[in-house]
Image (spheres, rainbow, N blue to C red):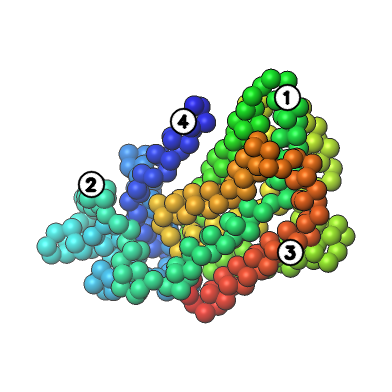
Amino acid sequence: MTFLALIAVTASTAFAAPTTLVLFHEIGCSHCARTEAFLESIHPSYPELEILHYEIHESESLDLLPKLLDAYSVEEGAVPILFVGDVAVVGGVFYGLEEEPITPTGRSENLELERAIRLAIDAGAPSPLSRVDEASGSSLAENLTIPAVVVAAAADSVNPCTFAVLVLLLGTLLVAQRKGKKTLVLRAGFAFTIAVFVSYFLMGIGIFSAIQAAGIQRPFIMAVSSLAILLGLWNMKDYFAYGKWFTIEVPQRWRPTVKRLTSSVVSVPGAFFVGILDSLFLLPCSSGPYIAILALLSKTTTRGEGILYLLLYNLIFVLPLVAITLAVHFGFTTTARAERWRSARLGKLHFVSGIIMFLLGAGMLFAVLMGWM
């Protein structure tokens, strides 16, 4: 029940739809600094408020700002420029808060800004960025988001490191189950799977939120895309020369410790702990596709949509673990046979994962260069 409660609390917090405020500022602008300080001071009172910061001279801002100004039917003016709900504020002039534009001064400006924020929150207003989407249509990158998530998660789910840990764990538990602990393999296998799901999901939310809060920029997307291409090529190398040079797997010096801890587990809580350990320390096997997808989602989705995609990604990611657990529990295979299958196909598993990572990275890089992201 504790595991289910953790998932329920996480989901209820994650699915609370945020209200997005888009702020364009300029380094050295005193008015911008005062506005940002005010927003920071009231943020604890409005935890559902999500603030996206854009520096006015950056390439992404130069592309996004004209679209937002057009969507709100206002003209460009002095910074700060911000959008929240149905309100646009350009150089201290409020559009959409009243029938006619108003220009409050001093403290009243902050009061009007807070009123605009409250109205947007109370109305459950969509993100200002959604107006850009409606005006310009979905970009190619957005149309490819679901296929990219599904394909990357499917490739990532064929994870030789996690398979090895689960098979070793189930082998140990089978011995304990023969001593009268019925369904131990099933319960512990699911506990391990839930731990992996929760850990990766929470880490994904953290990374996704950090990237969005920082206002992800074109150079970052290009760097992540290039890294995915390199990791993909290196993974494919293992099909032809497995084990030579560097292999994207658990470091050799960690393996005895992981094996010793896993082989000592004979309980459901122990299996859950091993699942968390697997998620934290076996990332070299799966961090590439996940980071690339997180970068893509942070660019093409809102926070609420991104979390839904993360749920989908991680559900696909753990499906093979569920299948292995059920197969061993019902006697369709043995842990020894499963390990032989995994060992015999290590090169192929790396090759498939490498192809997916390469194509994902190349597609993202091409989309950036073409201006689609």
Q: CA distance from mark 2 to mark 1?
A: 58 Å
Q: Amino acid at mark 2?
A: Asp
SS at mark 1 in the image: loop
* Residue in the picture at 68% in, 48% down: 283
Q: Nearer the viewer, mark 4 or mark 1?
A: 1
SS at mark 3 in the image: helix
Is the residue 357 above or below the residue 177 in the image?
Answer: below
In the image, taking residue 205 as reference, residue 232 lies left or right, namely: right
Q: CA distance from mark 4 to mark 3?
A: 38 Å
Marks 4 and 1, the one that precedes in the sequence:
4
Residue 90 sits in which quadrant? bottom left
Marks 1 and 3, the one that precedes in the sequence:
1
Q: CA distance from mark 3 to mark 2?
A: 50 Å
Q: Amino acid at mark 3?
A: Phe
Q: Nearer the viewer, mark 4 or mark 3?
A: 3
**Label 2 crowd bin: few (<14), some (14–19), many (20+), radius 10 Å:** few
Residue 255 sits in which quadrant? top right
Residue 60, disc: none
Residue 25 sits in which quadrant? bottom left
Front residue of 59 and 293:
293
- The residue labelled by disc 2 is 122
Marks 2 and 1, the one that precedes in the sequence:
2
Q: Nearer the viewer, mark 3 or mark 2?
A: 3
- The residue labelled by disc 3 is 351
Whether the residues at callouts 2 and 4 have beta carbons within 8 Å, the answer is no
SS at mark 2 in the image: helix
Q: Amino acid at mark 4?
A: Ala
- The residue labelled by disc 1 is 178
Front residue of 333 and 108:
333
Whether the residues at callouts 3 and 2 have beta carbons within 8 Å, the answer is no
Q: CA distance from mark 2 to mark 4?
A: 28 Å
Q: Amino acid at mark 1?
A: Arg
